[in-house]
Amino acid sequence: MLEEALQNFDGSVVVVSHDRYFISRVATTIVAVEDKKLVKYQGDYKFYTDKSKYLKKKLEERAVQGVKRIGSAPVIDIEALKATDKKKNFGGGKNSQMVSRPNKGIKNAKRNGIK
């Protein structure tokens, strides 16, 4: 509803957000802080990402050196993973009959002030 309201609003609104999808849906002008200066881009978020030399430089700095493109993710066999994944038992019983110290609950109740 907010997106639609902002898209149909005739005035100006300043939106500060990290949500790139939201910005791309509502912004028609981007004002970015680049090298301690405000730089205005007359266009949507895609236009800004295409034209901003500062943003391109930042993205290139974050890139992994020597990698030209990201390959496909490895295929993981979920069923095989489930078969080898065993829950760890930390010594507790699964029900009250399996508890090794039957008075443990009484001890804890006394510690918490319950009589």
Image (tube, helix red, strand yellow):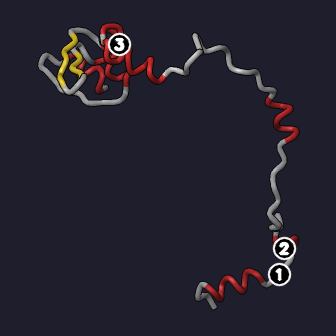
Where, by quadrant of the figure, is residue 34 drawn? top left
Where, by quadrant of the figure, is residue 45 drawn? top left
Q: Amino acid at mark 1?
A: Pro
Query: Where residue 13 sits in the image (x, y, percent)?
Result: 17, 24
Which secondary structure lies at badge 1? loop
Q: Which residue is mark 3?
A: 49
Q: Which residue is mark 2?
A: 99
Q: Residue at x 35, y 13 (%)?
A: 49
Disc assigned to residue 43? none
Categorize mark 2 by other alpha carbons within 10 Å: few (<14), some (14-19), many (20+).
few
In the image, taking residue 25 as reference, residue 8 lies left or right, namely left
In the image, residue 95 above or below residue 80: below
The label nearer to you, 3 versus 2, is 3
The tag earlier along the polypeptide, 1 or 3, is: 3
Disc assigned to residue 102? 1
Image quadrant occupied by the N terminus: top left
Q: Rounded to the nearest whole Å, what is the CA distance between mark 1 and mark 3?
A: 65 Å
Q: Residue at x 35, y 30 (%)?
A: 18
Q: Rounded to the nearest whole Å, what is the CA distance between mark 3 and mark 2?
A: 61 Å
Query: Where residue 11 sits in the image (x, y, percent)?
Result: 12, 19
Q: Rounded to the nearest whole Å, what is the CA distance between mark 1 and mark 2?
A: 6 Å
Where, by quadrant of the figure, is residue 60 drawn? top left
